[in-house]
Amino acid sequence: MAETITPPVLSGEPRLVPGVAEAARPGILTGKRGLIMGVANNRSIAWGIARAAHQHGAALALTYQGDALKKRVEPLARELDAAVVGHCDVTEAATMDAVFAEVGRLWGGLDFLVHAIAFSDKDELTGRYVDTSEGNFTKSLLVSCYSFTAVAQRAEKLMTNGGSLLTLTYYGAEKWMPHYNVMGIAKAALEASVRYLAADLGPQNIRVNAISAGPIKTLAASGIGDFRYILRWNEYNSPLRRTVTTDEVGDTAAYLASDMARGMTGEILHVDAGYHVVGMKNPEAPDMTLDKD
């Protein structure tokens, strides 16, 4: 009988169990329950996160704002076998209360939450920040920043065994970016909120982090002027010489929601092809001008 020689497992190479299919491996979110707030359509970053969480084994619930978005969200939820837990307008406390009450009724608890909610009057994303109106400033900060604290207050009560809170930010919180104006201030406040919430909720083993995603073609991005120019600039000047995708942001979010990131809190994790480390234009990048046609 011929001798069977088993090849050695090289360093870094996974050891496969004979006869066990790849699909049988549990995902990093298997057994976890997550609420995704802010899915707008199948191109939104929140949808990329929801899809990745589902692929990694999570049970999901989605919210929507208004009947128009309800018609978009319900078919997407069916793709992921996700529950739709109702209308949520973060400027109306009663709707947030209702959503979290429904999550509690559905699952009895919550393991992770994704906050992908922001707003500004797009007319005030042009021109100068100094001309921002008081009304738009107040609403932008309420929706884009305070709402994360508001949902954290409610999520804490359901995360009795710890959990993960995640929000989305952008490099405009750290540096001036064209056509971002008051959103830069709102995102800077949001990033500060991540740190303070992390300190407050850490004793309950609730982790709080943010992803600073590079520019991606989404419904929200359509309100930003010269967005195609910004995309191309990032493509030419980021270390990876490309932009990022919602799938890449989604995979990072799945990691942060999982126990693999159990030692991380208060972090702003950049998923931007490395653009945030760049200090000047790549000398090899072509010169660019704005196309105003």
Image (tube, grey):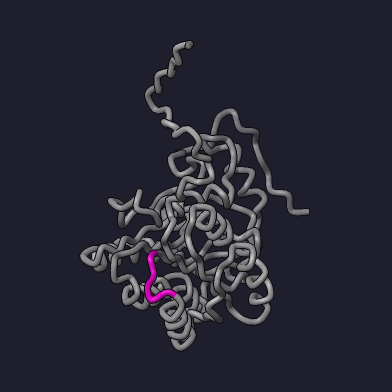
- Picture quarter containing residue 76? bottom right
Residue 237 in the image: above or below residue 48: above
The furthest residue to the top: 2
**Residue that appears at 44% across and 15% down:** 5
Which stretch is magenta? Answer: 107-111
Residue 80 vertical position relative to residue 105 in the rendered view, above or below: above
Q: Nearer the viewer, residue 111 or 26?
A: 26
The residue at the point 68 percent across, 75 percent down is 71
Residue 117 seen in this snapshot: no
Q: Nearer the viewer, residue 119 or 74?
A: 74
- For the C terminus, give its image quadrant: bottom right
Residue that lies at the very extreme toward the bottom in this rendered image? 94
Q: Residue at x 60, y 37 (%)?
A: 236
User: In the image, is residue 118 part of the stretch drawn in magenta?
Assistant: no
Residue 237: where, in percent of width, then height?
Answer: 55, 37
Left-right relation of 8 to 182: left
Residue 215 can be seen in this image: yes
| In this rendering, position of residue 11 left or right of residue 243 | left
Q: Residue at x 34, y 63 (%)?
A: 163
The x and y percentages for residue 110 are 39, 70
The one of 126 and 15 positioned closer to us in this rendering = 15
Q: How many marks?
A: 0
Question: Residue 109: within the magenta?
Answer: yes
Magenta span main SS: loop
Q: Position of residue 37 (x, y in %)?
A: 51, 70
81 or 122: nearer the viewer: 81
Position in image of residue 11 (x %, y %): 37, 24
